[in-house]
Image: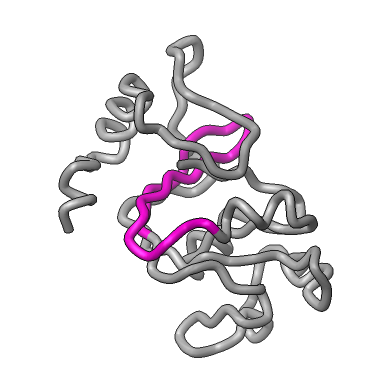
Amino acid sequence: MKLYWRGTRAWEDCRNFGFLAAGQGVQWSGPLKTLNAGDIVVAYLKRKGYVGIGKVVEKAKQVLDFRFDGKSLKSQNLVSPDLFKNSDNENSEYLVKIKWIRSVPANEAKWKNSFGLFTTQQIKSSLQNQIKTIKFLEEEFEVSFQNIMNE
C-alpha cells in the first residue's frame, strides 16, 4: 500500500501526528476510507521514495474529527495548515490514524534508481506481488512484513 502527497499536506505532519491523509476530492479520499484497523501501510513521497511503514489504528475521519492525544489538529503546530482546506465540504481531507513502525524524514526517503521498485499514481495499491520492492523495504527499514502482520 502506498500513498502520494499533495500540497495540502506535509509528510512531517503525518509522521509527527500519526496519520496518512488524502482529500480535495472524493476520488482521492475514497480509497483512503477503505483502510481498516490492522492494515499495513507503506508511505511513499512522489519523486523522493519510501518514508514509512505503519499499521492502521482506526478508519479514516474527516480532518476536523481527527484527534491526536485527544486534541484537534487545529490546536497543533502543523507544517501545512492547508490540511484544513475545504474541511467544511465533501472535498475535505480525510485522515487515517497510523502507528508508525518505522519512518524517516523526507530527506532520508528510501529509493534506488533503476532498480525496478514499484510506483503508481494511485492513492492505494497493493505491494502483494512486488517481491523486489518488499525485500528492498524490509532491508532499508529493518523490518519483516510477516512479523508486522503477526503482531
Q: At x 43% / y 12%, what residue is drawn?
A: 115
State the image coordinates of residue 124 (x, y, percent, origin top left): 55, 43
Q: Quadrant of the C terminus?
A: bottom left
**Between 133 and 52, which is closer to the camera in this rendering?**
133
Q: How is the image coloured?
A: one colour
Apparent side of residue 76 relative to residue 142 in the rendered image (left or right): right
Q: Quadrant of the N terminus?
A: top left
State the image coordinates of residue 101 (x, y, percent, origin top left): 31, 56
Apparent side of residue 22 relative to residue 147 in the rendered image (left or right): right
Q: At x 41% / y 49%, what residue is drawn?
A: 41
**Between 140 and 26, which is closer to the camera in this rendering?**
26
**Between 60 and 51, which is closer to the camera in this rendering?**
60
State the image coordinates of residue 44 (x, y, percent, origin top left): 52, 40
State the image coordinates of residue 118 (x, y, percent, origin top left): 48, 24
Q: Residue furthest bottom?
A: 70
To which quarter of the image does residue 131 belong?
A: top left
Q: At x 28% / y 26%, what residue is drawn?
A: 135
In the rendered image, the vertical position of residue 124 relative to residue 84, given as above or below: above
- Whether residue 49 appears in magenta in the rendering, the answer is yes
In the rendered image, the vertical position of residue 57 relative to residue 145, given as above or below: below
To which quarter of the image does residue 133 belong?
A: top left
In the rendered image, the vertical position of residue 73 relative to residue 149, given as above or below: below
Q: At x 45% / y 85%, what residue is drawn?
A: 69
Specify the segment rendered in magenta: 34-55
To which quarter of the image does residue 30 belong?
A: bottom right
